[in-house]
Image: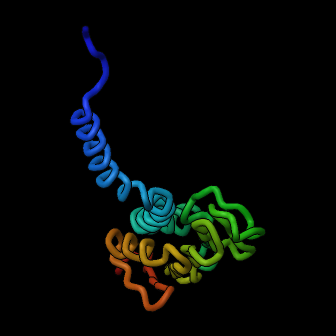
Amino acid sequence: MRRSGFTLIELIFVMIVIGVLAAVALPKFRYLKQNAEASNMIAAYTTLVQNGTPSLLNDTELNGLSLSDVNMTTLLKVPAFNYTDTTKKGWKKDDEDNIAYYAGDANNYMKFTYNNDGTVTIETKLAGVDKEHYQSVLAKKLGMTFSSDTNITTLNLLLDE
């Protein structure tokens, strides 16, 4: 008589393997959504650092705009919608053409303000339950340091003469 099925030892071994895989994989997926939101902020910041000066030179030297005529929508080209609801994530812009990326609510954002002098102020506010995770990711990737919930950085887009 032939038996079919698994022995108790085989079942215990499979349960142990599944437990080990879960212990290794679950922490990786814990902050999956927050890492995606932080990567949008990191991408915008690095895009501005890499392309801000050429874009400013293009606007002022080739298109004949003065420094006071340039705005964030020409420096950082993102699909931004007007500030109507800051509780939803995504790119928003205000009436002065400042651009911000909201990561889920009004307490987590990175706002880009052009100062009419060739500099851009970047205000990063991170609060709420995932504050420490957002701050650690941005500190690791961009070198930002946070005093309480906010980091303010100023980038000079003008070439040194």
The residue lying toward the viewer, choosing from 40 and 29, is 29
Residue furthest toward the bottom? Answer: 147
Residue furthest toward the top? Answer: 1
Left/right placement of residue 60 relative to residue 83 reads left
Residue 62, above or below 106: above
The quadrant of the picture occupied by the C terminus is bottom left
| Residue found at x 54% / y 74% | 110
Residue 135, image quadrant: bottom left
The residue lying toward the viewer, choosing from 41 and 113, is 41
| Residue found at x 57% / y 78% | 114
Residue 69, image quadrant: bottom right
Q: Is residue 64 visible?
A: no
Left/right placement of residue 48 relative to residue 3 reads right
Counting from the top left corner in percent of width and height, residue 11 is at 28, 35
Residue furthest toward the front? Answer: 1
The residue lying toward the viewer, choosing from 7 and 22, is 7
